[in-house]
Amino acid sequence: MSNERFVKLDPGERRPGRVPLPPPFRVLARTEDTEGRLSVLEVTLVRDIPRHTHHRADELIYVLEGELGVHFDGEDTSVPAGSFVLLPKGVPHALSRVGQAPPRVLQMSSPGGWECFLEDMFEAGPDVLHADGALDPDRINPIAAPHGIAYEV
């Protein structure tokens, strides 16, 4: 039995990547760790994520703390701590904070690659944001497209 892919992270540790991600994003399993099958991140949602579609990957989210707002298939739902949602590829969705404390979630993508998109986005710098700090779809879509992600304009 091979142990080449074994990963153990202590509290607060993260997998290193090509670009350091800010503290709200903690990579636990990179795409190459799982031979492409998935990526796993712990994410604190400090900003709402506008409506977008993953064309290649299912997104799986388990809420660890707080409450997550999910807009999916035309409906809004609140997802409290201890709850799970599966956002299938091809269906537009948006994520938002509910309440004062930002939700902390375990986010998985299958197949993997979401951490690679984040690295590309943060490498591009603040130019992908509006002046108010929200993602600018016109600026982020050229970075998201190679990863099979499209934000609505």
Image (cartoon, rainbow, N blue to C red):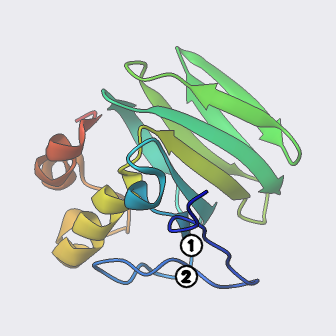
Q: Residue furthest right?
A: 82
Q: How far apart, in angstroms, are the residues tagged by discs 1 and 2?
A: 7 Å
Q: Classify mark 1: helix, strand or loop.
A: strand
Viewer-side residue, 134 vs 23: 23
Q: Amino acid at mark 1?
A: Arg
Left-right relation of 78 to 139: right
Left-right relation of 9 to 118: right
Q: Which mark is residue 23?
A: 2
Q: Which residue is mark 1?
A: 26
Q: Are marks 1 and 2 in contact (CB under 8 Å)?
A: yes
Q: Is residue 128 visible?
A: yes
Q: Residues within 10 Å of mark 1 (few under 14, many from 20)?
A: many
Tell me the quadrant of the picture where the C terminus can be found. top left
Dividing the picture into quarters, in which one does residue 12 lie? bottom right
* Residue 57, image x, y percentages: 40, 32
Q: Residue furthest front?
A: 1
Q: Amino acid at mark 2?
A: Pro
Dividing the picture into quarters, in which one does residue 101 lie? bottom right
